[in-house]
Image (spheres, rainbow, N blue to C red):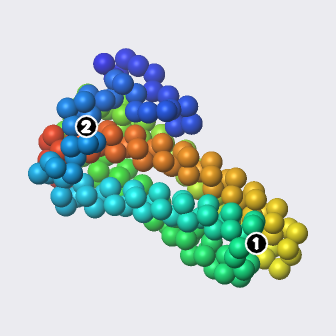
């Protein structure tokens, strides 16, 4: 049972722990889109997760382009400010809605997964610290825009931070989807909308 096991922290996980796959075995990813409850909330929520993955890719690709001198510094700074700000603001808002509304409601639908929701809450706290480091690294880049030597170093440091952040974000999003989508498909979206 999930309550009797130790749940690995975000950085130590490679998949959703087996004890939390209670509904995932009955509702595997391959069948989600064909399920009648997939439309609406589930589809929208997964699209938001896809946006965060895409933003991570853009930020990494842009940093690589800057390091390879395939993008002009001012254009890079504008894109970093736009997409980095979008990532930070949208992810904070997304996590607030999940923590304050979705998770408590969903946890009430299936008590077997309580430890999973505790895990996701822990992830969100960890992601807050990661987002702070991400923002600090991005601001370092923007602060040295006029100094080419420092800009290269700051961009490299940001790229490294962004890659580490993206890896943990992807792990979190995947685990969150594997836990939550089956709950909604099984019980319906009652109380979430």
Q: Position of residue 190 (x, y in %)?
A: 14, 51
Residue density around tag 1, few if under 14, some if 14–19, many if 20 or more, within 10 Å: few
Residue 74, by quadrant, is bottom right
Left or right of 187 on screen, residue 86: right
Q: Secondary structure at mark 1?
A: loop
Residue in the foreground of this view, choosing between 155 and 136: 155
Q: Position of residue 112 (x, y in %)?
A: 26, 28
**3D distance between C-alphas at marks 2 and 1:** 43 Å
The answer to whether one can see residue 136 in this image is no
Residue density around tag 2, few if under 14, some if 14–19, many if 20 or more, within 10 Å: few
Q: Is residue 41 above or below residue 141?
A: above
Residue 56, by quadrant, is bottom right
Dot 1 corresponds to which residue? 69
Instruction: Assign the C terminus to one quadrant of the image.
Output: bottom left
Identified at 52% across, 37% down, the residue is: 10
The answer to whether one can see residue 30 in this image is yes
Q: Is residue 103 above or below residue 79?
A: above
Residue 142, by quadrant, is bottom right
Q: Who comes first in sequence, dot 2 or dot 1? A: 2
Left or right of 54 on screen, residue 2: left
Q: Is residue 160 above or below residue 1?
A: below
Residue in the foreground of this view, choosing between 6 and 147: 147
Left or right of 8 on screen, residue 63: right
């Amino acid at each position: 049972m999930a309550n009797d096991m130790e749940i690995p922290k975000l950085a130590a996980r490679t998949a959703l722990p087996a004890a939390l796959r209670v509904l995932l075995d009955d509702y595997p990813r391959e069948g989600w889109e064909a399920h009648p409850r997939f439309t609406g909330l589930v589809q929208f929520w997964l699209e938001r997760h896809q946006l965060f993955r895409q933003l991570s890719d853009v930020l990494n690709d842009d940093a690589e382009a800057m390091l390879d001198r395939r993008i002009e510094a001012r254009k890079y700074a504008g894109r970093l400010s736009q997409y980095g700000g979008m990532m930070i603001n949208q992810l904070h808002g997304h996590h607030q809605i999940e923590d304050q509304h979705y998770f408590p409601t969903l946890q009430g639908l299936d008590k077997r997964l309580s430890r999973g929701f505790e895990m996701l809450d822990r992830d969100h706290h960890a992601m807050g610290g990661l987002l702070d480091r991400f923002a600090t690294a991005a601001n370092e880049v923007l602060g040295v825009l006029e100094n080419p030597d420092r800009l290269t170093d700051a961009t490299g440091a940001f790229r490294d931070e962004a890659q580490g952040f993206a890896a943990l974000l992807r792990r979190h999003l995947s685990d969150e989807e594997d836990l939550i989508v089956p709950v909604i498909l099984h019980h319906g979206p009652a109380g979430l909308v």
